[in-house]
Image (tube, rainbow, N blue to C red):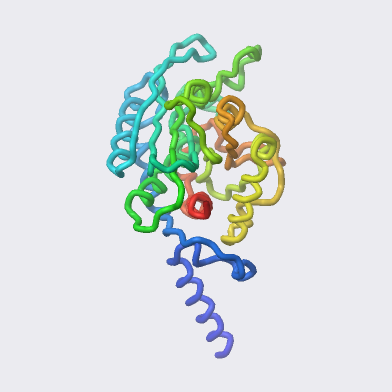
Amino acid sequence: MRNKLWLWAFLYLFWACGDRPASERIDRQSEEKTYKPVPAFSSDSAFAFIQKQVDFGPRVPNTPSHRLTANWLVETLEGFGWQVETQEFTAKAYDGKVLELTNIIASHNPEASKRILLAAHWDTRRMADKDTERIDQPIDGANDGGSGVGILLEIARILASDALQPDVGVDIILFDGEDDGEPEYRRQRDHSQIWWCLGSQHWSKTPHRSGYTAYFGILLDMVGGKGARFYKEGYSVQYAKNVVDKVWKYAHDLGHSDFFPMRRAEAITDDHLFVNENANIPMINIIEYSPDYGFGHYHHTHADNMELIDRKTLQVVGETVLFTIYQE
């Protein structure tokens, strides 16, 4: 009987804690630290935002699905009351194809001088070059693109609707043309040009506002997969080690240490690289990439669909990013 009572007491505490905002669920070891309160993050809402993107079809540049998704993203962010502008441009792909691309920039509390930049890419890959079938067909990109956007839309919704506000301004950039690089099976690669990350390459050299800067930035890429682990990516450590250390510490204080190992992974060419090098904004990358096996099994395959998306992973990443913003 005594064991049963202890079990019920444990379950009660578990259920009670699950409904509390992240800032109220700090590990006991961190109780002596003083953290600013943070609104609750909804993984269900983030999941729905991902599902909506996938429902449009693959968001491949120059396709109707791509245009419809862009319109929806702008309308959604404007509906939240954010100040939204688009940056339309063209860029050549590795095969000479001219891509019609759109970076989407949204701002909350635009008058604030101290700003935090959040980013993800919203396009999807036009081929499944790591798959064994339907290699020439585009992928859903539920995780690779969709998950980061879904989390950022949920953060945008929270900042627009919650009475509790951070002490900083927040900008969200949804980069286009990130995932149209050379296929795995291409034997001769042109190393004079980086064909990936076309949107961030363009924005970092010609920002939406002259002289734009941010205190730091966080890029989200492939942040919704089942069993995901987020290691300290190499370029993030090189350019913004203090930001990496801060975010990983917050994740551990929130009880998410299993998802954020204190271990470094190799450098990944991603949108944050160009934000760091060209815009001089220290930006880190939260990305699923293991130092042991690299990208997940789904990467650039048709397995990157909604069955891969896990609400727990979304909750962990969303809570950590939201918590980071509110501590500034």
Q: Nearer the viewer, residue 180 or 296?
A: 180
Q: Position of residue 315 (x, y in %)?
A: 48, 54
Q: Is residue 58 above or below residue 323?
A: above
Q: Residue at x 49, y 44 (%)?
A: 308
Q: Nearer the viewer, residue 166 or 190?
A: 166
Q: Is residue 20 above or below residue 314?
A: below
Single out the residue that lies furthest toward the top: 96
Quadrant into which the N terminus falls? bottom right
Q: Is residue 271 above or below residue 99?
A: below
Q: Residue at x 50, y 61 (%)?
A: 36
In the image: residue 17, left or right of residue 250: left
Single out the residue that lies furthest toward the bottom: 1
Q: Position of residue 162 (x, y in %)?
A: 35, 56
The answer to which image quadrant residue 32 occupies is: bottom right
Q: Position of residue 116 (x, y in %)?
A: 49, 42
Confirm whether residue 316 shows in the render: no
Q: What is the tally of numbered marks visible in this picture?
A: 0
In the image: residue 146, left or right of residue 35: left
In the image: residue 33, left or right of residue 307: right
Confirm whether residue 286 shows in the render: yes
Q: Position of residue 285 (x, y in %)?
A: 58, 39
Q: Residue at x 58, y 42 (%)?
A: 286
Q: Nearer the viewer, residue 220 or 62?
A: 220
The answer to which image quadrant residue 216 occupies is: top right
